[in-house]
């Protein structure tokens, strides 16, 4: 399973892009016209759904950014900076129960997962790589001359993303050559980073996609050299597409205007009765301990006055695949969903907003927004050549992989893509 972060469905059909590896895969396998993602369409919930087959309501990873009511602080899933685990059964759990191995290189939400014996989680700090990467694998890569001491710096800087993705591939090639697993999870990030920084279809983004295609080609060459290409099933997909950004709303500055948030001269909180966690084209609004009874209504009114912004109440959460609010949970009191062109942040001051990267494209929006659709391709044993899948749902990926692996994933919410599989009812 190879995730090319931010690989929108439209890229694969662009005649001006030379993508021999991706198009070769499509030619000998099956391809979806578009993969409909989940809400919010951000990396950490999407990747968790890709290995569980269930929505955030079931697996518990609600966004890249949430607020931890129990701890009283914002909580970042982004960069795997916390110990919160996945609340649903995963593909790697089922494989371990059957005595089979999973390897994962740069896959989100794998920190501390002992069911993956060869595991380098997705981090941005070198200290976390050193602490949580599987020690035997990490030592072997260093002894082979790979610069694992640079994984953190290369991961943290968008401009160095191509080197990070190269290192991810080299780690995967090492695992394939030494102890091939039953399931290998890979995650490349450069295309996502370059779209954020330079825009959808920009020269930089197009270069990044060609580079990702070249890395895929190198992976295919490695499998061929090992004599395993014809016995390996590959799934290549994006976790979301992108929307352009024209308007930015720094929502916690608005919370300050409502008198629900106060900071001292150094930016420390002296009062926090409400907080908003920005997730790109979505945002989570929290009324906190000590907030007045009118706080939610006042924030609903303030945010609802923003053009192109829908305010969503808890009664609508089930339709979004999100759980109902509960005491001490990460579930917000309100959700904001943006139209195309709008981007939410959680910056509380003008200085913080000015110091942050300026994204010209983003995601997180509702799945039905056309540009958010992701690419999906699969080929190899068990896959029916030439299958045209139309639109599929992201939640159907994990049950399909389970079917290919010959395991059950009882928590899955979506049926396998049987029309793409050989020897399956169609």
Image (spheres, rainbow, N blue to C red):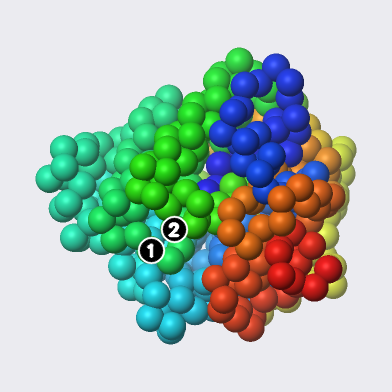
Which picture quadrant has residue 17? top right
From the viewer's side, name the closer residue of 388 and 17: 388
Q: Which residue is mark 2?
A: 184
From the viewer's side, name the closer residue of 101 and 303: 101
Q: Which residue is mark 1?
A: 181
Left or right: where does residue 62 sit relative to residue 267? right
Quick check: marks 2 and 1 in contact, CB under 8 Å?
Answer: yes
Residue 424, visible in the rendered structure = yes
Q: Residues within 10 Å of mark 2 (few under 14, many from 20)?
A: many
Which picture quadrant has residue 341? top right
Q: Residue at x 71, y 64 (%)?
A: 422
Provide residue 299's location: percent of width, then percent of height: 76, 55
Q: Residue at x 80, y 44 (%)?
A: 33
Q: Secondary structure at mark 1?
A: loop
Residue 266, visible in the rendered structure = no
Left or right: where does residue 130 sit relative to residue 79? left
Provide residue 305's location: percent of width, then percent of height: 87, 44
Provide residue 329's location: percent of width, then percent of height: 59, 75
Q: Residues within 10 Å of mark 1 (few under 14, many from 20)?
A: some
Q: CA distance from mark 2 to mark 1?
A: 6 Å
């Amino acid at each position: 399973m190879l995730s090319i972060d931010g690989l929108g469905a439209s890229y694969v059909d662009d005649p001006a892009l030379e993508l021999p590896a991706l198009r070769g895969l499509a030619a000998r396998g099956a391809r979806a016209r578009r993969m409909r993602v989940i809400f919010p369409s951000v990396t950490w919930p999407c990747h968790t759904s890709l290995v569980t087959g269930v929505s955030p309501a079931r697996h518990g990873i609600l966004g890249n950014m949430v607020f931890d009511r129990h701890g009283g602080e914002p909580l970042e899933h982004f960069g795997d900076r916390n110990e919160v685990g996945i609340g649903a059964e995963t593909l790697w759990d089922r494989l371990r129960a059957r005595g089979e191995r999973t390897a994962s290189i740069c896959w989100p939400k794998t920190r501390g997962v002992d069911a993956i014996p060869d595991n380098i989680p997705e981090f941005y700090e070198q200290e976390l790589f050193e602490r949580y990467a599987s020690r035997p694998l990490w030592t072997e890569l260093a002894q082979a001359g790979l610069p694992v001491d640079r994984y953190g710096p290369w991961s943290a800087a968008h401009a160095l993303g191509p080197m990070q993705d190269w290192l991810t591939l080299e780690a995967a090639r090492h695992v394939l050559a030494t102890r091939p697993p039953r399931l290998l999870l890979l995650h490349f990030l450069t295309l996502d980073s370059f779209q954020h920084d330079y825009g959808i279809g920009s020269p930089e983004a197009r270069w990044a996609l060609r580079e990702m295609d070249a890395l895929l080609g190198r992976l295919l060459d490695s499998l061929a050299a090992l004599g395993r290409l014809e016995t390996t099933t590959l799934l290549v997909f994006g976790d979301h597409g992108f929307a352009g950004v024209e308007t930015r709303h720094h929502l916690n500055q608005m919370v300050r205007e409502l008198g629900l948030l106060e900071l001292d001269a150094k930016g420390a909180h002296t009062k926090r009765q409400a907080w908003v966690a920005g997730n790109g084209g979505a945002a989570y609004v929290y009324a906190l301990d000590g907030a007045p009874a009118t706080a939610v209504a006042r924030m609903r009114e303030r945010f609802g006055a923003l053009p192109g912004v829908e305010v969503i109440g808890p009664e609508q959460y089930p339709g979004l695949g999100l759980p109902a609010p509960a005491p001490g949970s990460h579930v917000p009191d309100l959700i904001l969903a943006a139209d195309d062109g709008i981007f939410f942040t959680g910056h509380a001051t003008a200085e913080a907003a000015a110091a942050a990267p300026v994204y010209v494209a983003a995601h997180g929006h509702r799945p039905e927004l056309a540009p958010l659709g992701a690419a999906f391709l699969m080929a190899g044993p068990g896959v029916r050549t030439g299958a045209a899948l139309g639109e599929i749902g992201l939640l159907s990926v994990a049950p399909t992989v389970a079917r290919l692996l010959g395991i059950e994933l009882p928590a899955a919410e979506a049926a396998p893509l049987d029309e793409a599989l050989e020897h399956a009812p169609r």
